[in-house]
């Protein structure tokens, strides 16, 4: 995917030289760079990204700013963040994609009109992110399937967004994502729980001593859910 995106970037540069006063070209340039960022994110899906200490506030703010520019004025984005920076060991670009995906799903569920609230808190050595919308909600019979690959209630789409989000959160970051609450006609809240940077470091040390690096073992499940 990188080569076609590079070609698009070159074409945009040529257009900017020929039409320096065109108002649409800067927006086109932003979108092509955005496509490059997405390509970079998905190039990391096949291998385990190395987490680094990053600000969750900054990641969420990036998503809000992006959604504000790309959605209707009838969609209101509200943020409830602590005044201090909440630091987490993560791959910021992949995690940003997860939050974007949840927000875009929320916009679809609200049919382009409503409120999305992002809440960031710290609880019991965990970082908690809630993404709440005022959309149509999820039927009870569908709650167990929302993260299943191929499941979708949309007319268009492959139903892969939430399953990939779950993989990024739970396999790559050793966190947890689930539907905290949903009511038909009122909206849905997705919750993500992540370790703080300190707990993540302890987990990394513990995982190295496990036979398979801490993956898919009873011990790791107990550690995750304790």
Image (cartoon, rainbow, N blue to C red):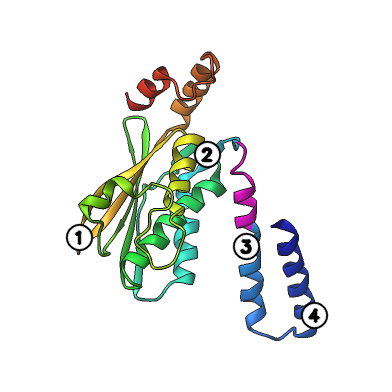
* Residue neighbourhood size for the residue with mark 2, other residues' Cα within 10 Å, grouped as few (<14), some (14–19), many (≥20): many
Name the residue: 44% across, 20% down.
217
Q: In the rendered structure, which segment of residues is drawn in magenta?
A: 37-47
**Location of mark 3 (residue):** 35
What is the number of the mark on residue 207? none
- In the displayed structure image, the side of residue 3 where residue 104 appears, left or right: left
Q: Which residue is mark 1?
A: 184
Q: Are marks 4 and 3 in contact (CB under 8 Å)?
A: no
Q: Earlier in the sequence, mark 1 or mark 4?
A: 4
- Mark pair 3, 1: CA separation: 34 Å
Q: Tell me the residue that label 2 is attached to.
A: 90
Q: Marks 4 and 3, Cα distance to the nearest angstrom?
A: 21 Å
Q: Is residue 147 magenta?
A: no
- Res 118 visible: yes
Would you call the spot at circle 1 few (<14 residues within 10 Å), some (14-19), or many (20 or more)? few
Mark with earlier residue (4, 3): 4
Q: Quadrant of the C terminus?
A: top left
Q: Secondary structure at mark 4?
A: helix
Give the answer, above or below, for where 133 lies relative to 92: below
Q: Residue tagged by mark 4?
A: 17
Q: Nearer the viewer, mark 4 or mark 3?
A: 3
């Amino acid at each position: 995917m990188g080569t076609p995106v590079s070609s698009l970037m070159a074409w945009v540069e040529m257009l900017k030289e020929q039409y320096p006063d065109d108002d649409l070209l800067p927006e086109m340039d932003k979108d092509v760079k955005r496509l490059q960022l997405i390509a970079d994110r998905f190039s990391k899906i096949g291998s385990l990204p190395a987490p680094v200490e990053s600000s969750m506030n900054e990641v969420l703010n990036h998503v809000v700013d992006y959604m504000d520019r790309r959605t209707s004025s009838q969609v209101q984005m509200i943020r409830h963040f602590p005044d201090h920076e909440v630091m987490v060991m993560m791959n910021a670009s992949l995690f940003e994609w997860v939050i974007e995906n949840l927000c875009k799903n929320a916009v679809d569920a609200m049919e382009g009109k409503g409120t999305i609230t992002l809440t960031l808190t710290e609880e019991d050595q965990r970082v908690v992110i809630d993404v709440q919308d005022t959309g149509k909600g999820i039927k009870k019979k569908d709650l167990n399937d929302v993260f299943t690959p191929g499941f979708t209630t949309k007319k268009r789409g492959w139903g892969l967004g939430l399953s990939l989000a779950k993989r990024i959160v739970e396999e790559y970051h050793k966190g947890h994502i689930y539907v905290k609450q949903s009511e038909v006609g009122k909206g849905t809240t997705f919750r993500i729980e992540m370790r703080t940077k300190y707990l993540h470091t302890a987990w990394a040390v513990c995982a190295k001593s496990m036979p398979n690096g801490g993956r898919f073992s009873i011990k790791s499940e107990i550690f995750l859910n304790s």
